[in-house]
Image (cartoon, rainbow, N blue to C red):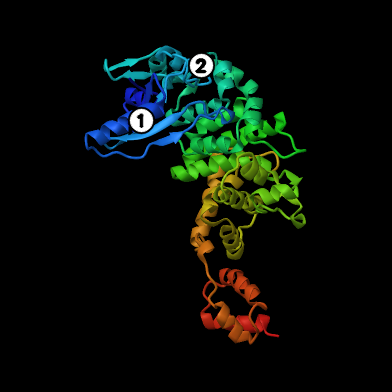
Amino acid sequence: MRVAGGWVRDKVMGLESHDIDIVIPLMGMQFAETINKYLQDTGEEWHTIGHIKANPELNKLLDVATVKIRGLWVDLVNLRSDSTGNPLTTATPREDAHLRDLTINSLFYNINTKMVEDYTGGLADIQGRILRTPLPPAKTFSDDPNRLMRCFRFASKYNYKVSESILKVAPLSSSQLANAVSRERIGAELLKILDSPFPAVGLEYILTSGIAPSIFALPPPLEMTDALIQHVVSSFKFTQEILPLANFPINQQRTLLFASILLQFHHLKYTEKKKEKNSRGSKGKCGGGGEEESACSFVLRVSLHLSNSVHDEQMKILNTVDTFATFFARSSSPTRKELGLAIRAVGPNWPIATLLATTTTPTRRGSATPQEAISQWSQLSQLATSLSVTESYSLSPMVNGKEVLSILNVPPGSIVGTVLAAQIPYLLENPTVTKPDVIDWIKRTFAR
C-alpha cells in the first residue's frame, strides 16, 4: 500500500498537505467497503463512502472512492498500467508512476517500508525546481490535454521552470485543448493559476507557449493573430514591471494581471448571436442596441465559462480604462465630478483601472516606462484622496424616493429614478450642500 502524488510531493518539499491519495492493486470502492466494515466491526466511527466513477469521455480515467479513517479523508484508487485506468490489468507502481502528469507528482511513499519510491526522477526535479513529464510530453498530454494547463498551474504554485520538452509540444497540444477539454475545466485551471502564489509565472507560459488562442478563444470571425498575441504579451509584461512599484495586495495583483491580458480584447467587437446570450444571460453589452459585444465579454463567459461575478468585475474595470486614460492624456486635471463618477462606475477596483490606463498599448496613449506610469497613477490617486472621492461608489442620494414623490407631488414610477440618479453628480459637484439645498435643487430642476 502506497501514498501517492501530492501528499508525497509536498512532504518532500517540507510543506503541509491533507490531500491523501492511496494507490492499491484493486478497485478503490472495494477496499473502501472493506475499511468501513472493519470500522463498524471494531465499533469505531465510520462514514458514507464517496464515489467518483471513471468517465473516459470527460478525461476522468480513475475510479475514486473516498473514505474517512480516524478523522482523515482518504482517496483510494487502483494502480494503472495503461492510460485507460483498466482495473482488470495487473499494474506495478513503476507503470502507474509513468502514467501520471508530472514527475514531481509521480512519487510514492511505501507505508510498509516507510520509504519514498521514485521511478521517474521526481526527487531530482524537485531539487532542480523544474517540471517534466514521466513519458514524452506528447504522450502524457494526449491522455488528457488539460494536463498542460495543470503543468502551468504547478509552475505558478511553486515558481518552477517548465522543461523545454514540454514547451516544444505545447503548440501541438493547443488544438487538443480546444477540442477535447471542456471550457469549464479550462476556466477552472486558469482561476487556480490566478489564485496561486506566483500567478504571473503561469500566465506568461500560457501567453508565450502557443496555447493562448485555445485558452482565450475569440468569437468568429475574430482571430487571435500573431500581432494581437504580441500586443497581449507586451501589455502583460509591462504590467508585471509596474506591479512591484504599485504595492498592491496579492488579490489586486491577480486581478490586474488578468485585466492586462483581457484589455487587448476589449475593443474588439463582434455581433452576438441570440443563442449565446440565452446561454449565460445578456450581460456585458457595449452599445449598438445590444447587437455589438466586447470580445472580452465573450472570452470571460464563453471561452473560459467563468462566473458572473468574475465577468462583471473584469468588465467594470475594462469599461472605465478609456475614461481614466483621457484624464492622463489631457493637460488639465479631472474635476471632482468627473473623477468621482469614473471611480463610482468601476467601484473598489478603481486603483486597478487607473493603473491599467497608464500602460502603453498600440491602441492607447500611455507612459513609456513603469516609473512614469506609477508617477501618473500616484498623482491621480492623490487627487482622488484630496477631493474625497476614493469611495464615491458608496455615495447615496440625500433625498430618497418617497421624499421625491412628496416634494414633486408625482405618482410612483414617474421620474423618481431619474431624480435619484441625478443627485449623485450634483453631490459630487457640490460636496458641501445640505439636504435642504438638495431639496431646493430638486424643485428648481424637476418641478413641472
- Label 2 sits on what residue type? Asp
Q: Nearer the viewer, residue 376 or 1?
A: 1
- The residue carrying pointer 1 sits among few (fewer than 14), some (14 to 19) or many (20 or more) residues within 10 Å by Cα, namely many
In the rendered image, residue 74, in percent from the top left (x then y), is placed at: 35, 32
In this view, the residue farthest toward the left is 42
- 140 sits to left or right of 197: right
Q: Quadrant of the N terminus?
A: top left
- Mark sitting on residue 196: none
Instruction: Report how far apart the C-alphas of labels 1 and 2 lie in the structure.
Output: 23 Å
Residue 414 lies in what quarter of the image?
Answer: bottom right
Q: How many marks?
A: 2
- 406 sits to left or right of 30: right
Residue 161 shows up from this direction: yes
Contact flag, marks 1 and 2 (Cβ < 8 Å): no
Residue 366 shows up from this direction: no
In the rendered image, residue 280, in percent from the top left (x then y), is placed at: 64, 49
In the rendered image, residue 303, in percent from the top left (x then y), is placed at: 64, 39
Q: Look at mark 2 in the image and give the residue it sits on.
A: 82
Q: Residue, x 70% and y 47% (percent of image)?
A: 276
Residue 304 lies in what quarter of the image?
Answer: top right
From the viewer's perspective, is residue 214 above or below residue 167? Answer: below
- The residue carrying pointer 2 sits among few (fewer than 14), some (14 to 19) or many (20 or more) residues within 10 Å by Cα, namely some
- 81 sits to left or right of 316: left
For mark 2, give the secondary structure. loop
- Mark sitting on residue 32: 1
From the viewer's perspective, is residue 401 above or below residue 387? Answer: below
